[in-house]
Amino acid sequence: MKATARVALILAAGAAARCASTPAPPTAAPEPVTAADFVASIADVAAGRNAALAETGLVLQKIELRLSVGRQTKGGAKVEVLLLDAEASRSAETAFVQELTLEIPRGGHRAAAPPPLVPGVVEFVDSAMNTARDVARAAQAAGLPQKLSGMELTAKITRSKTAGGGITATIPVWVKPSIGGELHATRDEENVVRMVFGPA
């Protein structure tokens, strides 16, 4: 009886060791983020939150995007996806840089933005607008004789490492407040989003 119990214990220990050493199945690669979904998401979320920023005297006027884009075949159709990581770059048939500018409408009322198509966009837009709000409030608190008339905020977009598989952003890559004159900058980096704030 003792021998049988000892054999059963050894077999159970062996099975447990096998389970512990079995590698976890590989996780599926996250779905690519299409350029169209990203642009639509950021435009919708920014427009829905712009009225709340006006209390600082600034609003988001335009968003300039410089994106690394590649074409992939998905379900028999060609789609343009953001090349946010090495995996996306390897699977792209062609790659190019796409530049576009979104003009943000000046809404007089707060509107609820539709749910974003791309995970991470809400957090990105909120962080960008909070940064602009903080700079505007700091300028006001410092008692500058000139009124803050504009601000540029540039962020770098990368692939999110979280389960959503969307985007994450480094905010800010740089911030440029202005008390007069035209704001403009030349940036050669790819996958950057430049947000231009002006008088409300």
Image: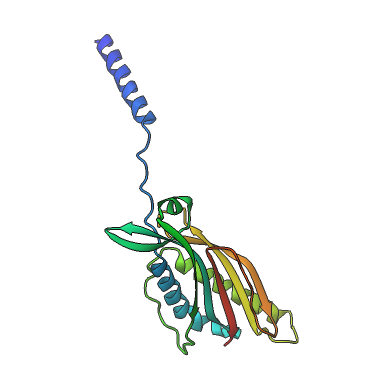
Q: Which residue is drawn at 59% across and 84% down?
A: 198
* Horizontal side of residue 179 vs 69, given as left or right: right
Q: Residue at x 31, y 24 (%)?
A: 15
Q: How is the image coloured?
A: rainbow
Q: Quick check: 172 above or below 59? A: above
Q: In which quarter of the image is residue 40?
A: bottom left
The residue positioned farthest toward the front in the image shown: 94
Q: Which of 104 and 115 is in front in this view?
A: 104
Residue 2 at x, y = what percent?
27, 10
Number of marks drawn: 0
* Horizontal side of residue 74 vs 70, given as left or right: left
Residue 168 at x, y = what percent?
50, 60
Residue 63 at x, y = what percent?
52, 76
Q: Quick check: 42 above or below 30? A: below
Q: Residue at x 36, y 58 (%)?
A: 72
* Horizontal side of residue 51 vs 119, given as left or right: right
Q: Which residue is drawn at 61% across and 68% down?
A: 187
Quarter the C terminus occupies:
bottom right
Q: Which of 85 and 176 is in front in this view?
A: 85
Q: Quick check: 60 above or below 88? A: below
The residue positioned farthest toward the bottom in the image shown: 108
Residue 164 at x, y = what percent?
40, 57
Q: Which of 141 and 107 is in front in this view?
A: 107
* Horizontal side of residue 182 vs 124, given as left or right: right
Quarter the N terminus occupies:
top left
Q: Quadrant of residue 24?
A: top left
